Image: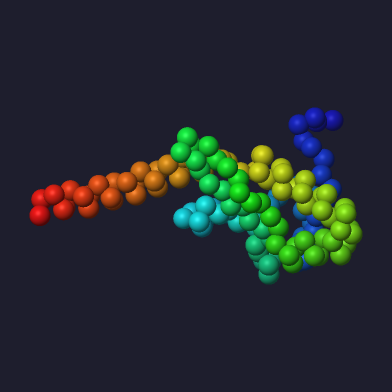
Amino acid sequence: MSSNKEEFEPAQCPCGRIISHPSEYKLLFLKKEQNEIDILCPNDTCYLRELGYITFRIDDDGNVKVEKISFYPPFVTWNVGRMGREKATKVLKAHLRWIVKKGVDWEKIKEDYMKRSREREEEEIAVTEEEITE
Ligand SMILES: [Zn+2]
């Protein structure tokens, strides 16, 4: 028996895919300017695809603050229909907590954010220099 692997109650996507462990969700960081990570169904041919999202900010000291992590209504409603509201809330919240704590590579996201913020600064400096030589 492994003590590292937490046991989770499964959730189900309306496409039929059972998600027995939160590590099965796909996390996609495309909306970089909005600091938003998409939570996707593991089924590549899923008609819903996006099951939820995470929004975050990075403060001046470089600490990541999660602002919101949430599943979208179609996924929630489906699971509430199968398990009842009380159980679905418990199961889905446990999945979300795992995603925030262990699913997201926050170090990588922080690095990426810092890199983009440096690039923005460089752009601003270039404009200033141009104005000086005018
Ligand atoms: Zn699906």
- Seen from the viewer's position, the closer of residues 105 and 132 is 132
Q: Where is residue 119 in the image (x, y as percent from the top left)?
A: 34, 47
Q: Nearer the viewer, residue 63 or 31?
A: 63
**Where in the figure is residue 24, as x and y percent of width and height?**
70, 50
Q: Residue at x 52, y 52 (%)?
A: 35
Figure quadrant of residue 52: bottom right
Q: With respect to residue 107, does 81 lie above or below?
A: below
Task: Give coordinates of residue 49: x percent, y percent.
Answer: 65, 64
| Quadrant where the C terminus is found in the figure | bottom left
Q: What colouring does the structure picture have?
A: rainbow
**Horizontally, is 69 left or right of 92 in the view?**
left
Identity of the residue furthest to the left in this view: 134
Q: In which quarter of the image is residue 18?
A: bottom right
| Left or right of residue 80, residue 134 in this image | left
The residue sitting at 71% across, 43% down in the picture is 98
Residue 109 falls left or right of residue 49: left
Q: Which residue is drawn at 47% across and 35% down?
A: 61
Counting the numbered discs, the total is 0
Q: In which quarter of the image is the N terminus?
A: top right
